[in-house]
Image: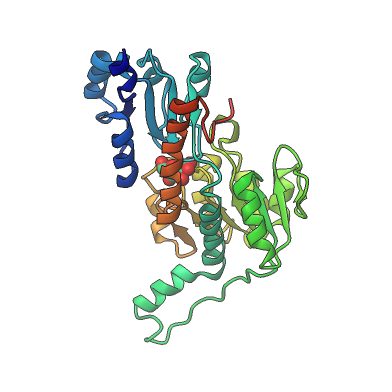
């Protein structure tokens, strides 16, 4: 009995995680790394699924209903990241499985990256870098003039923790801020705009920073992009699914909007190749949270959620049901 009480809880890890976190987890838990989705994983789940009381995943990988159902003794899921759209929360809730994630610790870095995209896209920094590298400066060519960032109108699509952090960054650039969200949020100078179309008409730059999933799929469609107009820019540091990518590519190709800064795409890691040819588009490989400091803090939160659950039944950051 005492031997059993001392046994390390068995965790199934379904995605590779930063090395420090993997080492920390292996010290405290009995960790099994699952093969990628496919027949090998299915065999593991069939043979050993009943062993695992914890599941470690990421926002990108998630945990679908079939995976949760294949773990009959599962008590807790700990996810690396803030996005929850790939995690079947309703199946977890029905099964009484607690779900932990890593909000807050990434607000600064995601906001910094989104703001970096605003500046890069409006000022054309990456394009200017390519201009120098190609030798165009040396050979006497001229770059087109860019758009001024300070004082420009910034419209936030979403006003959660990260959106609010972006709003604070914007105030240092004397940028008027409005946001589109289901509800007005008290305590901010930024104005709530119930109509996304109105926000797009008003804004010089729209920053998409709302949760992914079916509720926001293609929220930014061709009509919204038309409202943003040929002088307007768009930045997406949320989820590719929030923007209709086909409509976005068309708007960029036809000059319907002025430019785009994108950290996320509908079908990552696939990026529409036509965008490679456009100098007014900045493309990032989903790196908004990817700093040593923030990824370290996210890893720590993944661990602390599990340790808290097994020590006291309380997660540091429990996902909303
Ligand atoms: C990470 C993210 O890239 O937190 C999220 O939801 O999208 C990013 O911070 C992701 O967690 C890695 O899967």
Residue 291 showing in the rendered view: no
Q: In which quarter of the image is ligand 1?
A: top left
Locate the N terminus and report the quarter of the image it occupies: top left
Locate the C terminus and report the quarter of the image it occupies: top right
The residue depicted at 34 percent of the width and 76 percent of the height is 134
- Judge whether 64 appears above or below 223 on screen: above
* Closer to us: 29 or 1: 1
The residue depicted at 25 percent of the width and 23 percent of the height is 41
Q: Which colour scheme is used?
A: rainbow
- In terms of image quadrants, where is residue 158? top right
Residue 54 location in percent, x, y?
38, 24
Residue 276 location in percent, x, y?
39, 58
Residue 269 location in percent, x, y?
36, 45
* Closer to us: 19 or 215: 19
Residue 21 showing in the rendered view: yes
Left or right for 21, reference 91: left
* Closer to us: 136 or 45: 45
């Amino acid at each position: 009995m005492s031997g059993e009480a001392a046994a390390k809880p068995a965790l199934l890890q379904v995605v590779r995680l930063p090395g420090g976190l993997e080492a920390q987890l292996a010290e405290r838990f009995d960790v099994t790394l699952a093969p990628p989705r496919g027949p090998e994983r299915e065999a593991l789940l069939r043979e050993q699924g009943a062993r695992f009381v914890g599941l470690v995943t990421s926002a990108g990988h998630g945990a679908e209903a079939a995976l949760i159902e294949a773990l009959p003794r599962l008590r807790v899921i700990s996810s690396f990241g803030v996005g929850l759209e790939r995690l079947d929360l309703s199946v977890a809730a029905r099964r009484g499985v607690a779900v932990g994630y890593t909000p807050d610790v990434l607000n600064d870095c995601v906001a910094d990256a989104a703001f970096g995209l605003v500046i890069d896209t409006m000022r054309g920094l990456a394009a200017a870098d390519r201009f120098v590298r190609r030798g165009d400066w040396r050979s006497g060519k001229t770059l087109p003039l860019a758009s001024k960032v300070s004082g420009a109108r910034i419209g936030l699509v979403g006003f959660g923790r990260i959106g609010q952090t972006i709003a604070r960054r914007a105030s240092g650039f004397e940028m008027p801020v409005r946001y589109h969200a289901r509800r007005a949020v008290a305590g901010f100078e930024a104005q709530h705009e119930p109509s996304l179309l109105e926000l797009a008409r008003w804004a010089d730059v729209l920053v998409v920073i709302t949760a992914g999933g079916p509720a926001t799929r293609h929220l930014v469609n061709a009509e919204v992009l038309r409202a943003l107009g040929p002088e307007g820019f768009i930045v997406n540091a949320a989820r590719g699914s929030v923007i209709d990518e086909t409509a976005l590519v068309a708007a960029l190709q036809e000059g319907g909007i002025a430019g785009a800064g994108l950290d996320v795409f509908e079908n990552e890691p696939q990026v529409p190749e036509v965008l490679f040819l456009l100098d007014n588009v900045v493309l990032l490989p989903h790196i908004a949270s990817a700093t040593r400091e923030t990824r370290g803090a996210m890893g720590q939160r993944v661990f602390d959620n599990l340790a808290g659950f097994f020590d006291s039944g309380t997660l540091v950051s429990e996902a909303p049901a």
